[in-house]
Image (cartoon, rainbow, N blue to C red):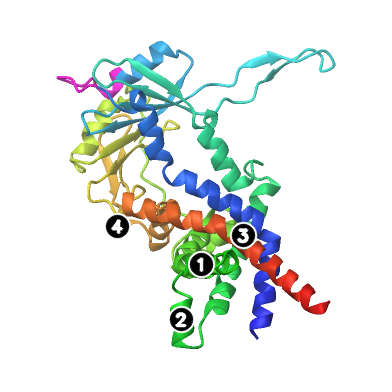
Amino acid sequence: MKIFFRNIHLYLSLAAGLVILTACLTGAILVFEKDLQMAMNEHRYYVQAGAARLSPDQLVRSVKDSFPKARTNSIKIYTDPQRSAEVNVAFPAEMKTVPAGNNGRATPAPRQPGYTIFVDPYNGKVLEKYSYRETWFYTVFALHRWLLGGEGSIGKYIVGISTFIFLFILITGVILWWPKTRAILKQRTRIKWSAGWKRLNHDLHMVFGFYSCIFLFIFAFTGLAWSFEWFNKGIYSVTNSPLKAAPPPRSAYDATKKKIGFAVALDTARTVYSGAVSYTVQAAKDSTEAITVSALRKDALHESATDAAYIDQYSGRLLGTLRFEERSLGARVRSSFKPIHTGSIWGTPSKILAFIVCLFGVSFPITGTILWLNRLKKKNGKGE
């Protein structure tokens, strides 16, 4: 029976090994992406604390002065006095004249990616116009998620299928590792560093595989949520939760009233969610949508466990709230996938663990291939 599982393990690994290696390597880099970004770009994220902050509306106005064509989507305010404010903006598609052959008509240019404008909350100075898509980390992310192919590309499905195969590789690996005796158990949980390179390679594959398999399985399993829609739907089906959340309350359209600013919406949200780590005020997209303020509590389970407050865009009245605990079980489970997948669920300790495990994942296609080649040589040598 082990020969059967060894063959399954081998052929699946040969089929998906290169993609798995790429995913683990890029995953190891992305584990500390946020930490590296903040460490390498302190001017973007940190400011000198001042006596008094400007209001969110003043910060938005400052961004508008610097970028007149920008449309403000949201503003994120941190309670940390040394953190900059983040204003998310979008720019309208501009018209361009195409070469002759299309009647010289003006056609819309491709829409620019969204930008985050980092602003000093004390003086309104624009610190940086930033787009994640223009960074080196985005290239690593695109390689990790789509093999650089982009959303909806064949690369997305190759990564998804390879991730799915990886689950079976891990399961068959545990079956092959499983010892029959206590002596073998001792051997397969320790690396004999003084042994020759073939034995050392064998131990690295078997021992590191044993210690990391459960974590790699979790990372691979959660990664499926970004590759397959059926997997996402399955989360809600298993948890017996509605796929779509109940619609939030809406504002009553009133043409006679002026819309409130970001500051009023933030002040209203603070009456129900005081002392949060950060507040994100999302502008209404139409004349009846409520302004949504997302608050991240200090005791939040993870970075995606935010509470929401819905504010009438004309009166500033609180229309309703939705605490994270009030979301459906499916929504809460799904929101945990990203912090689990990236290793940020428990902060720095879990990130270090994820980083090490990903490096192990990089090594397994290499040590496994060497094991296979050594077996081939041994088999061919016996046949001579």
Q: Are marks 1 and 2 in contact (CB under 8 Å)?
A: no
Q: Are marks 4 and 1 in contact (CB under 8 Å)?
A: no
Q: Secondary structure at mark 2?
A: helix
Q: Residue at horizontal 30%, vertical 24%?
A: 261
Mark 1 → mark 3, Cα distance in angstroms: 11 Å
Answer with mark 1 or mark 3, whichever residue precedes in sequence: 1
Asked if residue 347 can be seen in this view, the reply is no
Q: Residue at horizontal 51%, vertical 62%?
A: 221
Up the image or down, 142 lies above or below 200; here it is above
Q: Are marks 1 and 3 in contact (CB under 8 Å)?
A: no
Q: Amino acid at mark 1?
A: Gly
- Residue 155: horizontal and vertical position, in percent? 67, 48
Q: Nearer the viewer, residue 108 or 202?
A: 202
Can you identify the residue that label 2 sits on? 185
First to last magenta residue range:
48-58
Q: Amino acid at mark 2?
A: Leu
Left or right: where 115 falls relative to 108: left
Q: Mark 4 or 2, which is nearer the eye?
A: 2
Can you identify the residue that label 4 sits on? 325
Mark 4 → mark 2, Cα distance in angstroms: 43 Å
Q: Secondary structure at mark 1?
A: helix
Badge 2: how crowded within 10 Å, few (<14), some, or many (20+)? Answer: few
Q: Amino acid at mark 4?
A: Glu
Up the image or down, 104 lies above or below 267; here it is above
Mark 4 → mark 1, Cα distance in angstroms: 36 Å
Residue 209 is tagged as 1
Answer with mark 4 or mark 3, whichever residue precedes in sequence: 4
Mark 2 → mark 3, Cα distance in angstroms: 23 Å
